[in-house]
Every structure is written in structure tokens, then in C-alpha cells.
Image (tube, rainbow, N blue to C red):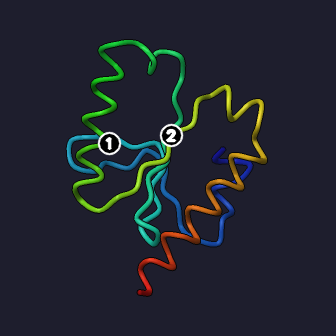
Amino acid sequence: MWYNFLRSHSLQFYRQRIIGNYIVDFYCPSANLVIELDGSQHYEGKTEKHDASRTEYLNSIGLYVLRFSNKDINDYFEAVCQKIEEIILSRLRRQLL
């Protein structure tokens, strides 16, 4: 995701950014957007609760969290990139209002 899309995006993305008590996978301050890539361990009980708490916190400070499984990235890379672009445009439009 980083090397094939986000690193060269027209908006600035940061990898492994600390926000509060969490480290997010990717962060775009211009769009108030966090992108999380989830491996299989993220679908287990304790980790799911931790991820839900993380998302709740990030939402509470005005960030939108997008989550994709590693399988989605591997199998549907172009569709994932398109979804990210749609959310970015939506977030930027919302900020202009």
C-alpha cells in the first residue's frame, strides 16, 4: 500500500504515526484520515476490542478510520485505492463546507 500508492499520493501521508496512545498504520492530516491494514490477528476477540477502542478514540478527535484486511489489499488492490480516493474527496469536500 505504501510503496505502490500512498507514498506518491498528492496529499501527504505518514506511516506509523503516533496519535494519542496509538500507532496508526497511515495518517493523512489534510483529510483527517487514518488507514489501518489488518492481518488475521485483528479478527480475534481481544484484538477486535482493542481495534474498536482505537477507532472510537480516533473518531472522537475528528479522524475517519478506514480498515482493510491484508486479503483485500492483495486481492483487490485497485478497488481499495479507489475507495481511499473516494473517502479523501468526501473528507476534503466536507471540510470546505
Q: Where is 14 relative to 71, above or below?
A: below
Residue depicted at 40% across the width and 56% down the height:
64
- Please state the horizontal and vertical placement of residue 92, each as a whole percent of the image: 50, 76
User: Secondary structure under badge 2?
Assistant: strand
Residue 6 quadrant = bottom right
Answer with left or right where residue 92 lies relative to residue 89.
Answer: left
Residue 94 quadrant = bottom left
User: Secondary structure under badge 1?
Assistant: helix
- Please state the horizontal and vertical placement of residue 62, each as a whole percent of the image: 29, 62
- Please state the horizontal and vertical placement of residue 7, each as a whole percent of the image: 64, 57
* 11 or 31: nearer the viewer: 31
- Residue type indicated by callout 2: Arg
What is the CA distance from the residue labelled 1 to the residue labelled 2? 10 Å
Q: Which mark is residue 67?
A: 2
- Please state the horizontal and vertical placement of residue 21, each as a whole percent of the image: 21, 41
- Residue type indicated by callout 1: Thr
| Crowding near the residue tagged with mark 1, few <14, some 14–19, many ≥20 C-alpha atoms within 10 Å | some
Mark 1 sits on what residue? 55
Residue depicted at 23% across the width and 59% down the height:
61
The answer to whether mark 1 and mark 2 are in CB contact below 8 A is: yes
| Crowding near the residue tagged with mark 2, few <14, some 14–19, many ≥20 C-alpha atoms within 10 Å | some
The mark nearer the N terminus, 1 or 2, is 1
Residue depicted at 29% across the width and 50% down the height:
58
Residue depicted at 29% across the width and 15% down the height:
46
Name the quadrant of the N terminus: top right
